[in-house]
Amino acid sequence: MIAATRLPLMTTTQDLNILLVEDDEVDVMNVQRALKKNNSTATLSRAANGIEALAMLRSNSHIPQKHNSKLLILLDLNMPQMGGLEFLKELRADPALRKLPVVILTTSMQDSEIAAAYEYHVAGYIIKPITFSSFVEKIDALNRYWSMSELPAPV
């Protein structure tokens, strides 16, 4: 029998920037705490709704621009002014922004919202866990995956 050997994970040299589009302060703090607990080097920016997020993305303000960086959008669906699905519709209609990866991070388990999100080509749909330890595990897995993935640089 051949013994299995563990190979070290190869990581990219790109820095991960996360734009969290979330209106709930507790959920924002949970993401911040989970990243810190996982010793993440990701840079976190925050928009309170879809309108604010689009303005940030279009103006390039508030999003760190590093030489070798990539951007991931973590998006809640249920927000005031412009919810997540409306944001996705606008994002995908914008030629400069349409290719940005988006992962949904929400409490909604409605099949119709899950299907609608994937119609807008989201990269994933994560239900917010109830316990903080589960939340930390999901954010860690998300961070590790996207840190290794090749993405275009932020716009």
Image (cartoon, rainbow, N blue to C red):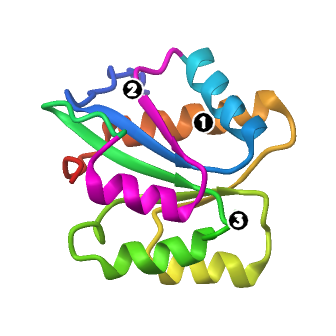
Marked residue nearer the N-terminal end (1 or 2)? 2
How many angstroms separate mark 3 from mark 1 (CA)?
24 Å
- Mark number displayed over residue 80: 3
Looking at the image, residue 7 sits to the left or right of residue 137; the answer is left
Where disc 2 sits, the SS reads loop
Report the magenta residues as a range: 39-61
**Viewer-closest of 29 and 54:** 54
- Mark number displayed over residue 102: none
Q: Within 10 Å of the Cα at label 3, are there few (<14), some (14-19), or many (20+) other Cα atoms?
A: few
Q: Mark 1 points at which residue?
A: 139
**Viewer-closest of 107 and 123:** 107
Q: Residue at x 34, y 40 (%)?
A: 63
Q: Quadrant of residue 98?
A: bottom left
How many angstroms separate mark 3 from mark 2 (CA)?
57 Å
Give the x, y percent position of residue 30: 71, 31
Q: Residue at x 43, y 75 (%)?
A: 121
Asked whether residue 150 is drawn in magenta, I would say no
For marks 3 and 2, give the one nearer the viewer: 3
Q: Quadrant of residue 26?
A: top right
